[in-house]
Image (tube, rainbow, N blue to C red):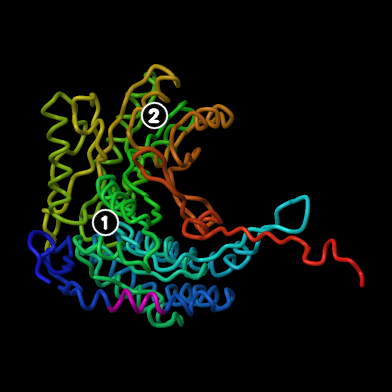
Amino acid sequence: MSASGPDAEPFETVDPYTGHTLAELPYLETAQLDALLERAHAAYRSWRDTPVEQRARIVADAAGLMRARKNDLAQLMTREMGKRLSESEWEVDLAASILQYYGDNGPRFLQPTPLEVDEGEAQIVNAPLGVLLGVEPWNFPLYQVVRFAAPNLVLGNTILLKHAKNCALTALEIQKIFADAGTPEGVYNNLFLRHSDVERVLAHPAVQGVSLTGSDAAGATVAEIAGRHVKKCVLELGGSDPFIVLDGDNLDATLDAATSGRLANTGQSCVAAKRFIVPDDLCDDFVAGLAQRFAALRPGDPGDPQTSLGPLSSAKAAQDLLEQVRDARDKGATVVTGGGQPDVPAPGKRDAFVEATVLTDVTPKMRAYSEELFGPVAVVYRVADENEAVDLANSSKYGLGATVYSSDIERARAVAERIDSGMVWINQPTSTQADLPFGGVKQSGFGRELSELGMFGFANRKLIRTLPDQSTSGAVAG
């Protein structure tokens, strides 16, 4: 199968810090893809009949293998997409905790649910659907794969996983972990898949759904394809999360949280705090404190523990972000700190770096007002009161996460209830953990992953209704 455009390029992973190519891997050709689809379908027919306790034990064993291989996995993620090593180590722990959570709790979540009926019995049973496609991004190479795969493997579905190009080696390691944990051949399948072949996969009669984490544009495309083929989908898309400050009682702690909430993973997170909404009487102090913290960051090798600002995932990602900053500055925004590219120590290349940047005076005519800023750029807005803060927070087309900071918890909860988003965290930047649901509204997508809810995104919640045998009713004794 020939291809042109971006699909003509092989799966290539490049160290964004050095610019060195780590690996080039070929796409699947049509015959190989068709064989994998048939293999996944054949595996499903036996996997769904494997006792749920055995499926769960394999997923829990994968958690143990992930912990045992933590150092190698963390270093690989850092090389492939530039995540600071401490953040890569945290991600391995998080991914392992999700595998363990579903390994421990999945069978309980899948127990039938009895329903109250006037006569006989009724219950909801949770059955798998079949083969699922996962389309996952590069920014959390382990976590985002595992939060899709773990519950669905326990449920009895089989997985086709299309990872991002620049995480090809991590993708292979994930497949190896599941294989070493005991998943039978065909149950978990890594696909080096062309974008143009996604529809071929979704059109296959064995494939019953797709989960995508990525941009809202990518989500719209995949949802349209899924809808055309009547396949279920779960979408976790972009975000422009508000961080609302209600008071300055603990301003230093709030500023520390704002810094970590914006700059974790070098700001490359859908649920990173991106829009800081601050009362007028606190705004000058907040901007000054945030700018001071941003300016103090040390760019460099993401594998060096002294580095506090790593590269973005690629030189292109850095240039795209800088264009958004330039657009804002050219249209009248104030660049309080940053706005350019820092010098970095050898053998690093500055191409993939962006200075930690604080913008103010951003208006709707600027791209930074409505677009997601995927990197270390914060926008601070000044508001008169909490009503204006809520209106500004809800003005975004996105609705993934949000953060509210206040010493008055009841006031913070009241504001949280008015925010149009899938998640609101009070007095902590938006985060994630295995036992809490994750997902958004509006153009941030639909469906929920993680927690007990994550078991049922691709489940057939089937009704079984039982009535007394009435075959002898009305019979006359002989």
Say which element carries label 1: loop
Q: Position of residue 277 (x, y in %)?
A: 37, 28
| Residue 195 falls in image quadrant | bottom left
Specify whether 340 is left or right of 382: left
Farthest residue, direction front: 478
Nearest the eye: 170 or 288: 170
Mark number displayed over residue 100:
none
Nearest the eye: 219 or 305: 219
Kind of residue at badge 1: Thr
Q: Is residue 186 magenta?
A: no
Q: Position of residue 310 (x, y in %)?
A: 24, 55
Residue in view at x 11 percent, y 59 percent? 6
Residue in view at x 25 percent, y 46 percent? 217
Classify the position of the N terminus by image quarter.
bottom left
Classify the position of the C terminus by image quarter.
bottom right
| Residue 113 falls in image quadrant | bottom right
What separation in Å lies between label 1 and label 2 (alpha carbons)? Answer: 35 Å
Count of numbered tags: 2
Specify whether 393 is left or right of 313: right
Of callouts 1 and 2, which one flags the residue occurring earlier in the amino acid sequence? 1
Kind of residue at badge 2: Asn
Residue in view at x 25 percent, y 30 percent? 369
Residue bearing mark 2: 394
Of discs 1 and 2, which sits in the foreground? Answer: 2
| Residue 57 falls in image quadrant | bottom right
Q: Give the extent of the magenta segment.
A: 35-42
Mark number displayed over residue 307:
1
Q: Position of residue 338 (x, y in %)?
A: 18, 39
Nearest the eye: 249 or 194: 194
